Amino acid sequence: MKSFYFSAAFCYVALSTVMPAQSRAYVANMSGSNITVVDTLTNTRKALWAVPGAPMGLDLSGSNLYVACASASVVSVVDTTSGAKIATIPMPAAPQRIRARPHASEVYVSLSDINKVAVVNTVSKAVTALIAVGTKPMNIAFNANGTRAYVANSTSGNVSVIDTATRAVVQTFASGLGANSLTLSPDGTTLYVANQFVNTLTMHNATTGALIRTLTGFAAPNSVSASPAGDRVFVTNGNAGTLATISTATHTVVATVHVGPLPMSVDSTLTRAYVANVNGYSLSVIDTLNSVLGTTIEKVGMNPVQVIVR
């Protein structure tokens, strides 16, 4: 087993300045039971926040970070100004991934063990609904106005579409076995689904769910992110240790960059993509304008499983 150390000074460092928008990356460290905060202006670690066991997913709602802590079966809420834990929300099963609903005081949490999605009210800090979806739900995506939630169901190989007003599944469509991650194009018309068991990326009409195209040649694709500009989509190849860049104009892979062992999560800005490498204990920062590895932040955390840039 690889040894892993943080200096005492790093463990207790505080964020002393206010960073501009989209200047932080938050990394969930599954085996470290903590969250690493990275200053994306300097690509340096700024803080380490303790959370309950096995954080698997995280997202920002307002100034609070919501963290899905699987082995503790809770969602932990952290104040991003101070780093203090302000609430612990019990879950009926181990939470896996979490996503904040736009324009609403809610976060959605996937509960893979019971095939449901929990709706959490961010004001009351309580579960207000449980929605049955497909088998082993994982990542969740919302359309821009928050009226639809898309849930990737890994074992059943499909996507559940939830009407967020009625909290009911209104549509289910096939994508591929191992549907693990999904993202919408910035214009909201196309849904991209990474299907890691069959090594495909499927493109769907976001309104009807109809299959537009299937892209092949991946190696356990387990995370997908669309560039805010809408011209590229980024896919992590878990078994190859690479990040693939797909042109949305030609629907082809136009670049492949080596990152670290077992990349499992990617999030992107206009000029960079951030990749969490589970077995590399690292965060790779890709210059997406030139499709090259910009830098690697080593020892970012123990088994970093998800990264978000906000």
Image (cartoon, grey):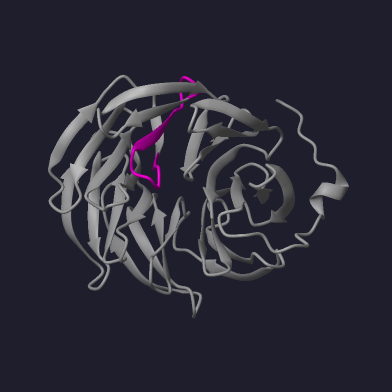
Residue 268 in the figure: left or right of residue 253 = right
Q: Quadrant of residue 49?
A: bottom right
In reply to whether residue 289 is colored magenta, the answer given is no
Task: Specify the farthest residue to the bottom.
Answer: 124
Q: Quadrant of residue 304?
A: top right
Where in the figure is residue 193, as x and y percent of width and height? 29, 39
Task: Specify the farthest residue to the front.
Answer: 289
Residue 162 in the figure: left or right of residue 97 = left
Task: Report the residue at 48% width, 26% height from top.
Answer: 291
Position of 50 relative to 90 (above/below): above
Q: Does the rendering let one see residue 198?
A: no
Q: Magenta part of the protein: which range?
A: 225-242
Where in the figure is residue 27, as x and y percent of width and height? 60, 47
Q: What number of labels is visible?
A: 0
In reply to whether residue 239 is colored magenta, the answer given is yes
Question: Considering depth in this image, is 154 or 9 the residue closer to the camera?
Answer: 9
Question: Considering depth in this image, is 229 or 80 the residue closer to the camera?
Answer: 229
Task: Report the residue at 28% width, 35% height from top.
Answer: 248
For the N terminus, the image quarter is top right
Q: Does the rendering let one see residue 130?
A: yes
Residue 33 in the figure: left or right of residue 169 = right
Where in the figure is residue 281, as x and y percent of width and height? 65, 33
Task: Report the residue at 19% width, 42% height from top.
Answer: 204
For the C terminus, the image quarter is bottom right
Task: Report the residue at 49% width, 22% height from top.
Answer: 257
